[in-house]
Image (tube, helix red, strand yellow):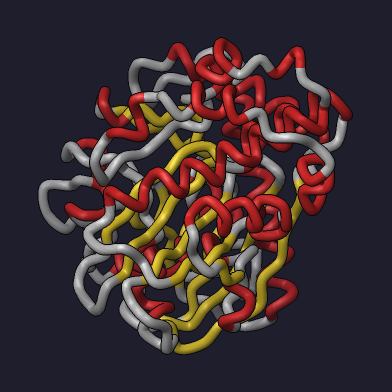
Amino acid sequence: MTAVGLMSGTSLDGIDVALIETDGERVAAFGPSRSYPYSDADRALFFRALKDARTVQRRKERPGCLGEAEARITGRHADALLDFLGMVQRPVDMVGFHGQTVLHRPEQHLTVQIGDGAGLFAAMQRSPFAPRALVYDLRAADVAAGGQGAPLVPVYHRALLAGVARPQPVLVLNLGGVANITFIDGAGEPAACDTGPANALIDDFVMSRTGAAYDAGGRMAAAGRVDEVVLALLMAHPFFRLPLPKSLDRNDFRDWVTQRGGLDAMTTEDGAATLTALTAACVAAVLPLLPRHPQGLIVAGGGAHNATLLRMIGERTGLAVERADALGWDGDALEAQAFAFLALRRARGLPISFPGTTGAPKPLTGGILIGSLP
């Protein structure tokens, strides 16, 4: 079957859309993908929504500008999906809609991804290639059952690695706003966790200093000096001592870094270098918690384009770092592809989270299904 995934990640840079052919267990073929950047006005609204979401106590609450942000998110996804369907010009069976995470507090059994699934399903009927079904809100069931609700992509990583000859165990590292890893060792259930901040802290710091959205290629960090004393203070965070699985909200480290990082006294280059080293050190810190030492590291996500970050990860982990693109994967579209895959698994009643990936009490499916497959 053909499935399209829609992903708006914690970096808040835009919507990734990707098509795959899959039965929810194997990936038969990769289809096209496309990114749809958010406007400056969109990003400003979504960042305000992140602040307003901090007061949310129940999943359906929409204080402050959250209601406006949800309508905007849904509209932007509808525009992207309709454009994408017009581009591919082929029937599609399923859509997986992640929405936008604005709050993630699994210890409170609370995770909030804004996005109106029913509204998006209605909007996509305007296309002559309208998909038959849509799945959204994929994290809530896992969190309600006591899991972390993240990461959900590991089962897709396992499917991808089934077709790749690499010494195992192997790590797949996604560098989005937050970094997460999947540990694959054979055909069994994967292990996974968030490792710590990735692009979010670097992007926000660079934006505040220069107005640029990110440190392109890691050039600012490459020109700076890592403050190892500050880095050691930041790595004292108790999160790094927690066993797997574990997950983070985009803003979990913001106050910690503000209080201990001393970034205000650093040059832009030194601050970027220290935050980039923090991301690398977070990845290294997870290695002693894994069942076995990995033989290699495959990197995807926006951070895979940051050469300085990849170099630091290699230095601090001692692992050979390989970009996902080198395996024939699309590292930028991989998470969107994953939510297409997860949506089809949900439609078939297959689990999307596992005790070793989210801490769920048993393998669980999740998500709300609208429509049906033949």
* Position of 243 relative to 234 (above/below): below
Q: Quadrant of residue 41?
A: top right
Where is residue 246 drawn, in percent x and y? 31, 40
In the image, 216 versus 106, the foreground residue is 216
Quadrant assignment for the N terminus: bottom left
Image point (72%, 72%), residue name:
86
Direction from residue 139 to residue 271 in the image, left or right: right
Vertical placement of 283 versus 264: above or below? Answer: below
Q: Quadrant of residue 302?
A: bottom right
Q: Nearer the viewer, residue 275 or 149?
A: 275
Residue 25 position, x and y percent, is 31, 79
Relative image position of residue 215 (x, y in whole percent): 79, 43
- Residue 257 location, x and y as percent? 57, 20
Location of residue 291 (image quadrant): bottom left
Q: Residue furthest front?
A: 229
Q: Image check: 96 left or right of 183? A: right
Which image quarter is the C terminus in?
bottom left
Question: Is residue 23 among what the camera can see?
Answer: no
Residue ID at (53%, 37%): 197
Q: Nearer the viewer, residue 96 or 177?
A: 177
State the residue at coordinates (48%, 55%): 317
